Amino acid sequence: MSRAYRAGESVEDYCRVCKTDRMHVVVVVDGEKRPIRVVCGYCDSEHNFRGGPRIGQEDRPAPRSDSPAARAERTVREPLPVVSERERVGPAMSVQSSGNEMDLEMLLRRIIREETGITAAAPAEKWRNGSLVLRPGNPQLQERVWPIETFFQKIVMLRNRLRTLEQQVNAAELPADVKVKLQGYISGCYGSLTSFNVLFADEEDQFHGSSSD
């Protein structure tokens, strides 16, 4: 890995929880600006950086570092899907005594996500493989470009943590007026984030603030 990273930037790595390559957010870097700790943008699990993506690497020899293939691989890498189509569009599941065809892993994933408020979400089709461009008003300054999937993952992580916070507030033993006030702040946060609803494929995944927002 030749490029330097900073905390908060995105990097692709293998997630042991998801058992596949995912886009991660860098949490800690070493003195040479190499990632040490990362957080999976899909399941929010934090782990040591494992050296980058693994899928598709086992069956082919690694290109020489000075070869054109190696340079192209370092500069161009399509972002991974935020959520697999298998999990997002799969049919509803139920536990049956004679159900030998039930996908237990998928069922557990859905139960955990529903209980914790960390639900799977996918970007709208028109934004996939797109780019987010920040162009300064000064033409002499360089613009910044990110894959929309990377930006979308950060929005989903923020949404999931807001939902978790909302659940914690609802379950906390607090005075009624304090709880109402905190719930109002959370609803206000949802309302402020409704501008990003255009990114979501499904309406039920979008932000919904109070009626006054």
Image: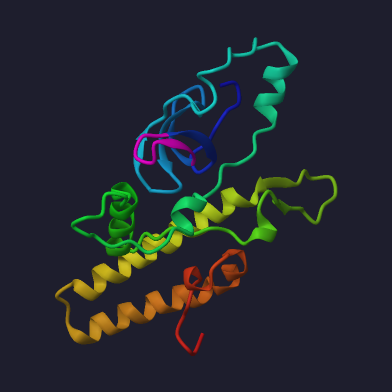
Q: Return the residue nearer the eye: 132 or 97.
A: 97
Q: Give percent across and percent down for residue 138.
A: 82, 52
Residue at image coords 40%, 61%: 119
Q: Give percent across and percent down for residue 112.
A: 28, 56
Let me know if residue 19 is in the magenta part: yes
- Furthest residue in direction left, as rendered: 173
- Furthest residue in direction bottom, as rendered: 212
- For this view, does 166 lie left or right of residue 202? left
- For this view, does 12 lie left or right of residue 110? right
Q: Give percent across and percent down for residue 130.
A: 70, 51
Q: Is residue 198 above or below residue 63?
A: below
Q: Return the residue nearer the eye: 113 or 171.
A: 113
Q: Is residue 83 visible?
A: no
Residue at image coords 54%, 68%: 202
Q: Is residue 176 visible?
A: yes
Q: Quadrant of the N terminus?
A: top right
Residue at image coords 47%, 57%: 88
Q: How many numbered marks have been drawn onto this rendered protein structure?
A: 0
Let me know if residue 18 is in the magenta part: yes
Magenta segment, which residues? 15-23
Q: Is residue 43 above or below residue 200?
A: above
